[in-house]
């Protein structure tokens, strides 16, 4: 145990003091000697100067002797007496540890609703079966029989976890197979697999953009992309959400700045960063104009496509297929495996050079344990299901369109009826606070419809939508009757809560 000990002056500390005193004494003696020899003052004045320097020398000599004979202080034995067990118990009982987090933060972190069972078109929430509009299981493949069978076979063959990062002993044949299948499905040269979808954009952007590089991003990009831009320490410019004229204005300003500085050749990397379907607003990026501007000004284009893969395009290949654009014209495409592909993790597509660069520079790839083999097998089975039966993508798009039309029939709700994404953002007229939207979502759940209330934001997200909204995610397995009932329920609950 630690014991309080009064400050001591051990002999080891006195020695430097001793040396200092000796030096001071020598200087005093030298000075007095010089004054005596320099010009002796005649008579009584010369005699009066002798006792002064002798007095100084005597004081210094006495100080030296005192320091030499001084002993270091040793604490008494009674100061080392340890506490008795009774005293220790008493101190432990009196100790009140501070909480690791404030109580209000802990209460907000606890989930309000507990799910049990599969998250398909219906789910069991708090013990009751409800229509599920809160899951991004767009194609219903997380509960598809072929995907489940692939997981069971992989568990029997490989076990549960990979127990290592990809660069060491965490690469398994199903990882390489999945990367080949993703690249083939999206239509790019190569693909790389990440273990966590949110960490994918946050790793990809810093792998290419460094300090001194330029990133021009849509102001409405979500947390994973914004986090990656901040981590890259590059120079960030933003343009107004989906405003291509403002984007070109920013690009022209950067070009004019280069001209003023006399830069004849661009020596830094430059990127335009956007999302295919924006997680904050649910609307679609104008990809044709983005591609045209990035080619005109010679930038690289990064598109986060998590809400579009498996949802948009004739065969579910994402925003590029939706606009009939060659995916090779988009330099980097990132997306999640947990939305339409019924698994967990993320991926990045591009040229072989872009992918190989990330194998040594993508932090989420290098320093995370690789994806469990059964989840990689699940994603392979999901891609096989989409390729062999692309009609499920058409069914999803039809369901999303029908649900939007039904919502437009309800009074007091504002929805983009023609938007193709399966993520439907519902604005309640006259409601602009998250609390009321939360009560509407709770009222819907009580009547058998489970959807998401207002989003929560990170401090990194500088731009926020003007109004909060409800969010509903349509699944290809929803029946028309389920979607019609859900739309009517949302409208009725919105009217009831808005009157309060």
Image (spheres, rainbow, N blue to C red):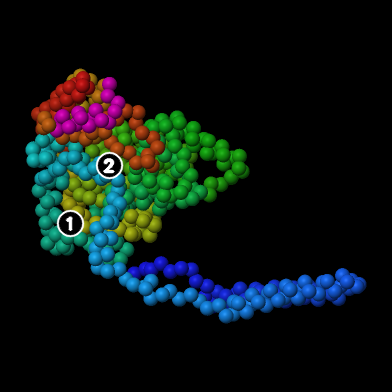
Q: Residue 109: x and y, percent?
A: 25, 44
Give the mark nearer the N terminus: 2 vs 1: 2
**Mark 1, secondary structure of its residue:** helix
Quadrant of the snapshot with the N terminus: bottom left
Residue 335 among those drawn in magenta:
no
> Against 260, is 489 above or below?
above
> Against 316, is 39 above or below?
below
Residue at label 1?
374
Residue at the image position 32 percent from the left and 71 percent from the top: 82
Residue at label 2?
104
**Mark 2, secondary structure of its residue:** helix
User: What type of secondary structure mainly makes up the magenta span?
Assistant: helix
Q: Residue 498: x and y, percent?
A: 22, 22
**Callout 1: 10 Å neighbours few (<14), some, many (20+)?**
many
- The image quadrant of residue 28 is bottom right
> Against 25, is 121 above or below?
above
Q: Nearer the viewer, mark 2 or mark 1?
A: 2
- The image quadrant of residue 193 is bottom left
From the viewer's side, name the closer residue of 268 and 210. 210
From the viewer's side, name the closer residue of 295 and 16. 16
Residue 188 lies left or right of residue 479; in this view the side is: right
Marking on residue 486: none
Q: Tell whether label 1 touches label 2 (CB within 8 Å).
A: no
Residue 443 among those drawn in magenta:
yes
Residue at the image position 20 percent from the left and 61 percent from the top: 161
Q: Residue 197: x and y, percent?
A: 28, 48
Q: Residue furthest front?
A: 44
* Residue extent of the magenta highlight: 430-445
Residue at the image position 43 percent from the left and 74 percent from the top: 75
**Callout 2: 10 Å neighbours few (<14), some, many (20+)?**
few
């Amino acid at each position: 145990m630690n014991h309080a000990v009064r400050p001591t002056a051990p002999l080891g500390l006195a020695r430097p003091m001793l040396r200092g005193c000796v030096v001071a004494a020598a200087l005093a003696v030298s000075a007095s000697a010089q004054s005596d020899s320099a010009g002796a003052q005649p008579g009584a004045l010369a005699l009066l100067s002798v006792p002064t320097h002798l007095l100084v020398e005597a004081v210094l000599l006495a100080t030296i002797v005192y320091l030499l004979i001084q002993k270091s202080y040793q604490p008494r034995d009674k100061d080392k007496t340890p506490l008795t067990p009774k005293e220790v118990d008493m101190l432990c009982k009196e100790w009140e540890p501070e909480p690791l987090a404030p109580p209000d933060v802990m209460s907000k972190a606890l989930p309000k609703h507990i799910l049990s069972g599969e998250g398909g078109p219906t789910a069991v929430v708090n013990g009751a079966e409800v229509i599920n509009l809160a899951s991004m299981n767009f194609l219903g493949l997380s509960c598809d029989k072929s995907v489940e069978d692939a997981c069971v076979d992989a568990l029997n063959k490989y076990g549960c976890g990979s127990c290592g990062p990809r660069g060491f002993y965490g690469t398994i044949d199903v990882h390489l197979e999945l990367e080949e299948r993703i690249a083939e499905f999206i239509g790019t040269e190569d693909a790389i697999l990440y273990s966590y979808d949110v960490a994918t954009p946050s790793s990809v952007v810093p792998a290419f953009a460094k300090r001194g590089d330029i990133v021009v991003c849509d102001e409405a990009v979500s947390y994973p992309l914004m986090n990656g831009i901040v981590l890259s320490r590059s120079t960030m410019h933003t343009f107004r959400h989906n405003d291509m004229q403002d984007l070109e204005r920013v690009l022209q300003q950067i070009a004019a700045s280069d001209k003023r500085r006399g830069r004849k050749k661009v020596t830094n990397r430059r990127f335009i960063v956007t999302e295919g379907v924006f997680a904050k607003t649910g609307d679609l990026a104008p990809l044709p104009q983005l591609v045209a501007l990035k080619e005109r000004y010679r930038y690289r284009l990064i598109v986060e496509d998590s809400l579009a893969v498996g949802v948009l395009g004739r065969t579910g290949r994402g925003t590029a297929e939706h606009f009939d654009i060659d995916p090779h014209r988009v330099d980097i495409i990132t997306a999640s495996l947990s939305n339409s592909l019924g698994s967990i993790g993320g991926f990045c597509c591009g040229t072989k050079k872009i992918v190989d660069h990330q194998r040594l520079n993508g932090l989420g790839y290098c320093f995370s344990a690789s994806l469990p083999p059964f989840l990689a097998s699940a994603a392979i089975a999901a891609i096989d299901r989409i390729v062999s039966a692309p009609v499920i993508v058409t069914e999803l798009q039809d369901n999303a369109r029908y649900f939007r039309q039904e919502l437009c029939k309800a009074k007091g709700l504002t929805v983009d009826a023609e938007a193709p994404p399966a993520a439907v953002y519902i604005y309640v007229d006259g409601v602009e606070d998250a609390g009321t939207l939360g009560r509407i979502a709770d009222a819907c759940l009580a009547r058998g419809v489970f959807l998401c209330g207002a989003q929560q934001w990170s401090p990194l997200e500088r731009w926020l939508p003007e109004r909060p909204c409800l969010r509903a995610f349509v699944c290809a397995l929803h029946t028309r009757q389920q979607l019609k009932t859900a739309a009517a329920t949302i409208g009725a609950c919105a009217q009831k809560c808005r009157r309060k």
